[in-house]
Image: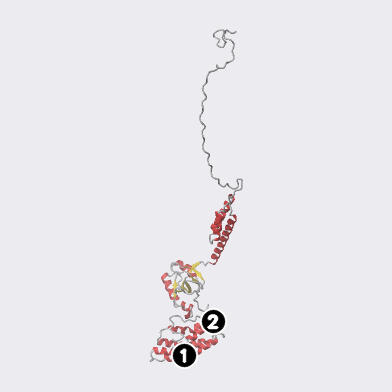
């Protein structure tokens, strides 16, 4: 049941008719005028844009710009051509090939060429190193060298290691002899040196039998064990060696003994040795007496001891000396004539001129040593 009362707020009033259609506003009512609005913004000027850059290769379209040559490829080729730069050529060549895989550049052929040249340089260097090692003479103790060996460095009691070289190449010394030290145990540095010096004094004459083959600048040195280690490692020996002290000596072997000389050469230098020594002695009466004694002995030693090919030259030399013997013997027996006058008479009668010719035939040194008192023209 519903109750129509004032308490019913939702009920329509009794005296109010039903809802009518909504009417529009009375005509003639002026509204607010329309707002004119804001003026249009002129806007920003058009951006000129960025300049056109060449596009990256491979992203569509054909570019008119040709790709450049890779710099590493060029460098690889240049260093490959230059001697001793093969490591750089290999490195730059590999780097260029890596870059060219990512870049559209020219130069692959240059990189390959540089890499090949670098590998060739590496191969040649390796071959050269092998040859150097194969031909290099290792250092050895001077106490282990044999007679006739030549070496470069100057040995000393502190440094005995030397490098052996052929005697026909520049060298410092040539071993002329060795001394077998007599003590069973190391006698001490002083005693070992004393014995070595004593025995080495004769090695020069026996090592170089021909006095004409001994340079005036030749010096002989000796080296003895300095301590127990040298004594044990060196085999209880001392070493004698020769050094030519000339500023620019001729690199040649000095040895002239029975090992290196032919039989004819050996016979000649062995027989004429005393006469050559007489020529280097002071020009006094003693020298005249020695020469008068040695000439007949030389003729005996030359008699029939040479090969048939050299015998005619030996015979001519003997005939000249035979004619000179009486002159020297007469001068030796003359105690009153002044020595200078005696040598004036003997000038040209010592056989030097004939000896020079004979030496040339035998292939021996044909120039008298410096200090020789004789010449081809006189005594």
- Given the current orientation, which residue lies at the most extreme front position? 28
Asked if disc 1 and disc 2 are in contact, CB closer than 8 Å, the reply is no
In this view, the residue in front, 328 or 43, is 43
- Given the current orientation, which residue lies at the most extreme right position? 61
Residue 219 location (% of width, % of height): 44, 75
In this view, the residue in front, 244 or 179, is 244
Which numbered disc flags the more N-terminal residue, 1 or 2? 2
Residue at x-position 42% and y-position 69%: 189
Residue at x-position 43% and y-position 92%: 330
Q: Quadrant of residue 202?
A: bottom left
Residue 120 location (% of width, % of height): 58, 60
Looking at the image, is mark 1 or mark 2 nearer the viewer?
A: 1
Residue 311 location (% of width, % of height): 55, 86
Q: Quadrant of residue 291?
A: bottom left
In this view, the residue in front, 30 or 66, is 30
Looking at the image, is 16 positioned above or below residue 180? above
* Circle number at residue 31: none
Count of marks overlaid on the render: 2
Residue 233 location (% of width, % of height): 48, 67
Q: To which residue does mark 1 refer?
A: 325
State the SS at label 2: helix
Looking at the image, is 258 positioned above or below residue 99? below
* Mark 1 neighbour class, 10 Å CA radius: few under 14, some 14 to 19, many 20 or more: some
Mark 1 → mark 2, Cα distance in angstroms: 27 Å
In this view, the residue in front, 360 or 301, is 360
State the SS at label 1: helix
Taking the image as shown, residue 222 lies to the left or right of residue 89, namely left
Quadrant housing the N terminus: top right
Looking at the image, is 35 positioned above or below residue 318? above
Q: To which residue does mark 2 refer?
A: 263
């Amino acid at each position: 049941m519903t109750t129509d009362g004032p308490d019913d707020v939702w009920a329509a009033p009794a005296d109010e008719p039903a809802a009518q259609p909504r009417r529009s506003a009375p005509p003639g009512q002026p509204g607010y005028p329309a707002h004119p609005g804001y003026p249009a913004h002129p806007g920003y000027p058009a951006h000129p844009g960025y300049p056109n850059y060449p596009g990256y290769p491979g992203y569509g379209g054909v570019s008119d710009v040709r790709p450049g040559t890779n710099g590493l490829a060029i460098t690889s080729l240049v260093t490959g051509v230059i001697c001793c730069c093969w490591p750089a050529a290999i490195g730059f060549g590999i780097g260029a090939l890596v870059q060219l895989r990512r870049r559209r550049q020219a130069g692959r052929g240059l990189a390959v060429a540089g890499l090949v040249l670098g590998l060739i340089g590496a191969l040649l260097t390796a071959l050269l190193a092998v040859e150097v090692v194969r031909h290099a003479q290792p250092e050895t103790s001077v106490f282990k060298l044999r007679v006739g060996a030549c070496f470069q460095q100057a040995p000393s009691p502190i440094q005995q290691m030397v490098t052996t070289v052929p005697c026909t190449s520049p060298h410092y010394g040539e071993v002329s002899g060795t001394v077998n030290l007599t003590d069973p145990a190391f006698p001490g540095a002083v005693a070992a040196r004393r014995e070595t010096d004593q025995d080495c004094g004769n090695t020069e004459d026996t090592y170089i039998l021909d006095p004409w083959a001994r340079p005036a600048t030749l010096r002989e040195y000796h080296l003895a064990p300095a301590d127990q280690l040298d004594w044990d490692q060196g085999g209880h020996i001392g070493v004698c060696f020769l050094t030519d002290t000339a500023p620019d000596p001729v690199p040649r072997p000095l040895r002239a003994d029975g090992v290196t000389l032919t039989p004819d050469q050996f016979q000649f230098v062995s027989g004429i040795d005393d006469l050559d020594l007489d020529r280097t002695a002071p020009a006094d009466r003693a020298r005249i007496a020695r020469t008068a004694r040695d000439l007949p002995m030389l003729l005996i030693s030359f008699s029939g001891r040479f090969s048939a090919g050299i015998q005619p030259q030996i015979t001519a030399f003997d005939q000249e000396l035979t004619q000179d013997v009486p002159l020297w013997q007469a001068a030796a027996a003359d105690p009153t004539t002044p020595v200078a006058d005696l040598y004036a008479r003997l000038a040209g009668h010592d056989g030097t001129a004939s000896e020079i010719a004979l030496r040339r035939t035998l292939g021996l040194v044909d120039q008298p040593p410096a200090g020789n008192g004789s010449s081809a023209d006189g005594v």
